[in-house]
Image: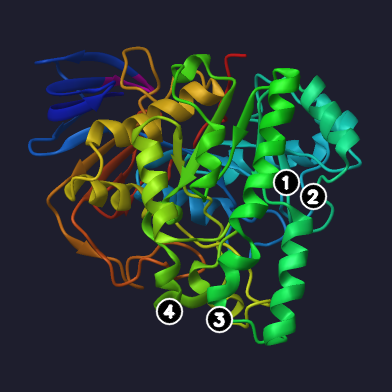
Amino acid sequence: MLTLIKNAQLVNEGNIYQSDVLIKDKIIKQIAAEINVETDKIIDAEGLHLLPGVIDDQVHFREPGLTHKANIYSESKAAVAGGITSFMEMPNTNPQTLTQKLLEDKYQIGAQNSIANYTFFMGASNDNLEDVLNTDPETVGAIKIFMGSSTGNMLVNNKKILEEIFAKSPMLIAVHCEDENIIQENIKKIKEKYGEEVPISEHPNIRSAEACYKSSSMAVELAKKYNTRLHVFHISTEKEIALFDNKLPIKEKRITAEICIHHLWFDESNYVEKGTLIKWNPAVKKKSDKEALLEALLDDKLDVIATDHAPHTLEEKNSTYFKAPSGGPLVQHALPAMLEFVKNGKISLGKVVEKMCHNPAICFKIENRGFIRESYFADLVLVDLNKPWEVNRDNILYKCGWSPFEGETFNAKITHTFVNGHLVYENGYFDESQKGMRLTFDR
């Protein structure tokens, strides 16, 4: 199968230029100013920008066990419509991914149902060290540690176990950092004031900057002690930025950090309108945090933009503070949201591609993805930067059926998404005849 993309504005590795791209089966065969060959399909991309497929390094697709909220099929479909061609899924499902067998079970589901490329993280607990250390670095994305509140048995608060994982892990460790003791102390104080009727505006005070910093600084300290390859998820506070540096290129960093869409877009003023719909862990915090995080992203102290896509039903979210779960759906709207920042002059298009496509591939050492390069897999996205559309219930693809961006008008629209050379999405229509591939890693 030969597919030719003509006249695209190619955005790749810091450059934007007009180019044709020839795809042969799953692979980018040729990139040149003009390609004229007989092909099975030609796409005229005049007026469109061609990006590498987005790699989302943190999603919760809820399968197995929580599929009333979402599943790998439904959320991978939404992801592809949003220009995300590869995802990394977290272990806090039901059952939790705490054994090698349960991890492999999820890969089987991905192979059968995902229309995007996929990897799944091995979960750590206080009780599964042997399974964690047996994880294959070449075929599994990372070890995931919840160093803060989590569900069930996934809070790792045994310092000895943490030390062993950091000392012995053969691969990247990704961490959720919030200090449970500080959170519980804050809950106690807030309950003394409000009882059970805590307003959502108290969420950033309960899951405070101090809780984030104490946990993330411990993770960084352990990584430096053992020279561990550490990746810190969803940085949410200005205070934490000081833990990371921009002195080294990302290829040489041993400690990297991620920022999520919601911490760049929302701040505590949005709780009035959005309520528990924007209840995330870590919490959306002050406007000054949001502004500092964007600056740190531009300054390369923060390396990756992701979603932490974590859907719940509206019935679950529309509850009281303590009953409403944390998390929200984002994969369909992450790239359009960042392209809105581009339109508003807050970030360059090249920097968005660097943080959403190139850097996740470098950070996790993903083989042959994240760039528009000859011989790489043809994970590609065409976007129209001047095609306004409004997010509403009719065009939301998440199984949960809602979005924190409802009512928002985005000025950029994804028109085509290729996964491994297969045109899976084109102007609202899907061709699901081919499934995504399991990601592999050069480690």
Mark sitting earlier along the chain (4/1): 1
Cα gap from disc 3 to disc 1, whole angstroms: 26 Å
* Residue placed under numbered mark 4 in the picture: 272
Q: Mark 1 belongs to which amino acid?
A: Phe
Q: Nearer the viewer, mark 4 or mark 1?
A: 4
Q: Are marks 3 and 1 in contact (CB under 8 Å)?
A: no
Magenta-colored span = 23-27
Q: Are marks 2 and 1 in contact (CB under 8 Å)?
A: yes
Q: Find residue 154 and name its label.
A: 2
Q: Does dot 3 land on a helix, a strand or a loop?
A: loop
Left or right of 78 in this view: 343 = left
Graded by Cα atoms within 10 Å as few (under 14), some (14 to 19) or many (20 or more), the crowding at tag 2 reads many
State the colouring used for the structure image.
rainbow
- Which one is in front, 432 or 63? 63
User: Of label 4 and label 2, which has the lower sequence position?
Assistant: 2
In this orientation, which residue lies closer to the viewer: 338 or 89?
A: 338
Mark 4 surroundings: few (<14), some (14-19) or many (≥20) residues within 10 A: few
Q: Amino acid at mark 3?
A: Asn
**Real-space Cα distance between discs 4 and 1?**
29 Å
Of tags 4 and 2, the one toward the viewer is: 4
- 321 or 293, which lies in front? 293
Q: Which residue is mark 3?
A: 318
Residue bearing the label numbered 1: 146
The three-letter code of the residue at mark 2 reads Met
Looking at the picture, how far across and down is residue 78, in whole percent? 42, 54
Q: Earlier in the sequence, mark 3 or mark 2?
A: 2
